[in-house]
Every structure is written in C-alpha cells, then in structure tokens.
Amino acid sequence: MESSPADGSGPGAAHVPTCYRHRGRETYLRCSRCDRPICPDCIREAPVGQHCPECVAEGNRSVRQSRTVFGGRVISRPVVTWTLLGLMGAGFLAQLADPGQRMTVLFAMYGPAVAGSGEWYRLLTSAFLHGGVTHLLFNALALYILGRQVEAVLGHARYIALWVLSAAGGSVLSLLLAPQEWSVGASGAIFGLFGAVFVIGRRLRLDIRFIVGLLVVNLLITFLVPNISWTGHIGGLITGALLAAGYAYLPLGSRTGAAGRRGQAPAHWLATAGVAVLLVGAGIAGAALLRQGILLLGP
C-alpha cells in the first residue's frame, strides 16, 4: 500500500480553491451570491454575507436611479452650468485676443450673413461672445444664480436642451424682427432660464416673487437702455417658458406612479423636438423674408 508524499501534493491531496480573479491566491472564502471563491482583496461586504465585484456590479445595474420630480437624473454638481460659464469666458478671451474684432464679425448674430451666406451657426455662437466685461459679468452672474437651480431640477440633459434652444430662440426672433442688427451675448439663454424658473416655480407652488422682480427689472432695462437686443431677450424668454411648461406639465393627467414616470421622458423629448421644429421653421421663414427684402418691423 502506497502512502502520499509528505507535502500533500500527491493524487490524494485535497484540492485547495483559488480566487477566481487571482488564480495564484488560495482561499476558502466564497461569494454569498454566486458561490465563487474570492480572496480578501475581492471581498465586497454586503448586508448579508460577502459578495464578489461582479455580483456587486450586477446588483448596482438593477438599482433604479434617483430622479427629480420632472424626470431628470439627480445631479451632484452643476457641471453643465460650470461648462457654459467656461465657454462664455473662453469666447470673451478670444475676443480680447483679436483686436480687429474678427471674432465678432465671424460669429455674432447678423441676419444677412445667416440668410445670404447660410451661416446658421451664428444663432448659437453669438451666445458665447459679449460686448464688454460688464455684459459678460451680468450674464455670468445670472447664469450662476439661475442655471444651478434649473439644472438641479431638470437634470443635465433637459437643462442643456432648454439653454441651447433658448439661445437659439432669441436669435431666431432677431432674424425675424431685427435682422439688420448685430448682436452678441448669452442673454437669450439667460432670459430662457428666467422663463423656466417662473414656470417651474408656479408648477411647484414656490414663492417666486424675487424672480418675478428680477425679471421685471431686466425687462425694463431691455426696453429703456439703448443698444440692447430686445428681440434676443424676448425670444429667449418665450422659448424657455414654453419648453419649461412642457417639462413641468407633460404628460397630461396623472404624473404619479410608475406609469406616469414612464410617460415623462417620451413626452418631454417630444416637447423638445416640437420647440426645435418651431424654431427651425421660424428661422427658415425669417431668412426667406430677408432674402426677399421684406422687413417685418420696417427699416
């Protein structure tokens, strides 16, 4: 009768399990969920037992992400607002580095360039240029105050859509009613945020008297101070309020429960697409009128 070697490595030796992720590490620990062997470095503590990294990742995928009342993902930082502030600052620095004002000539909102040369990008690029330090600081402060609130309530994606379409809405109204004017600044988007805060505040029954007061003051400045593009401000305000109403009140009917939450996203993106289509149609109409030499508000 043969005996096994003293080191226990012969045919009769018991098999020692090794970690499924680190094959060289012997272990007697196992995942409580899948029963695979895991070493101490791979252990993830769980309410009951211990799990391997793959089981933890699979469990996290099945956890429903927190959503705001309007269906956006709950955010930890207003990264979109910070990014927009950075782009506004970068645009102004580019203007300062170009004393010949080529940046303004090439990227400001100007109807004949849009209608005659097809430079539709001006509808958005003009939002990142400004007419001076004071102009930039006022818009940056308003974006800092309002943008963070709207982004927190709507989430990143809806907030981006509202900001971009509000900026475009201001440019489109300028193309329709004041196409011969040069205009720069993020004021259209800022007024869109004013409109969004007003609508969202009404929907949530918040005290919005302070915001209404700020809006009234800004509207007075718009119409009383010369050389301000009132069309850009009003176009942004209307667009932002309209889109925010879609986010705040759609889908119609009950917005509670799983069925209501499932209907939010399609309704909101249809509202976004609808506003975008309206702006495209209005922009095309404005360009066509300008090419025909028709000015809706006269010379």
Image: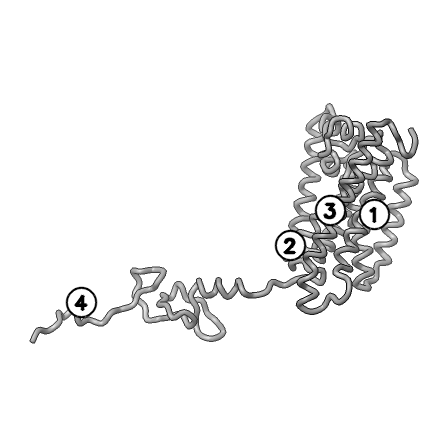
Residue at 36 percent across and 60 percent down: it is 21
Q: Are marks 3 and 1 in contact (CB under 8 Å)?
A: no
Residue position marked by numbered label 4 in the rendering: 9
The circle drawn on residue 77 is: 2
4 vs 1, front mark:
1
Q: Residues within 10 Å of mark 1 (few under 14, many from 20)?
A: many
Quarter that holds the C terminus: top right
Q: Earlier in the sequence, mark 2 or mark 3?
A: 2
Q: Earlier in the sequence, mark 4 or mark 2?
A: 4
Quadrant for residue 133, please give it: top right
The circle drawn on residue 163 is: 3
Numbered circles on residues, count: 4
Q: What amino acid type is highlighted by mark number 2?
A: Arg
Distance Cα–Cα, label 4 vs label 3 = 70 Å
Distance Cα–Cα, label 4 vs label 1 = 81 Å
Residue at 72 percent across and 48 percent down: it is 273
